[in-house]
Amino acid sequence: MNEKILWEFLQEHLNAIYSGNFEKYKDSCVEDLGLYEWFVAPHRIDGLDFHKFMMEADWAGTHNKFNIMLLDKRAQIYGNCAILSYTLVVSSKNEEIAHKVVNESRVVVNFDGKLKVVHVHKSPGK
């Protein structure tokens, strides 16, 4: 696995999320994706249905204008599996500019040449 390709894949994955492109997001994840999102629930959320609803409802308010920055990036690569950890800064503009900061880890697996996110863990960034 190539670190540059991993970060490019992640950027496309995140762009799909914040632009509300569920089909592209779905294509970049496994069906049984597991997530810990501290701001949603204190429990693991499994599957894609939750995010389908949230993305279609424009939960992040970013369908119009947004900017994504990844800070303190680290890639740990083990064979066909990589753990990408970083601080995500999302700036969006609806009526006003808003910023969201979250620490994230995403586990990415290479399935015969196709990268997929299999697990996500988020924690507060500030």
Image (tube, rainbow, N blue to C red):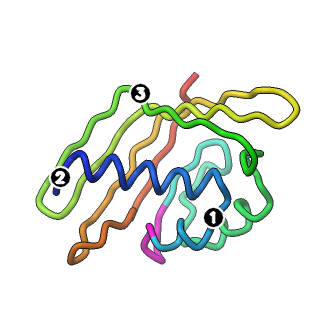
The amino acid on which the numbered mark 1 sits, given as a three-letter code, is: Asn
Q: Are marks 2 and 1 in contact (CB under 8 Å)?
A: no
Give the residue at x 32% y 45%: 84
Q: Position of residue 13 (x, y in %)?
A: 47, 56
The residue carrying pointer 2 sits among few (fewer than 14), some (14 to 19) or many (20 or more) residues within 10 Å by Cα, namely: few
Q: What numbered label is drawn on residue 12?
A: none
Q: What numbered label is drawn on residue 71?
A: 3
Give the residue at x 54% y 27%: 125
Which tag is nearer the camera, tag 3 or tag 1? 1
Above or below 36: residue 102: above
The residue carrying pointer 3 sits among few (fewer than 14), some (14 to 19) or many (20 or more) residues within 10 Å by Cα, namely: few
Q: Nearer the viewer, residue 10 or 75?
A: 10
For mark 1, what is the residue? 21
For mark 2, what is the residue? 2
Quadrant containing the C terminus is top right
What element does badge 1 sit on?
loop
Q: Is residue 27 left or right of residue 100?
A: left
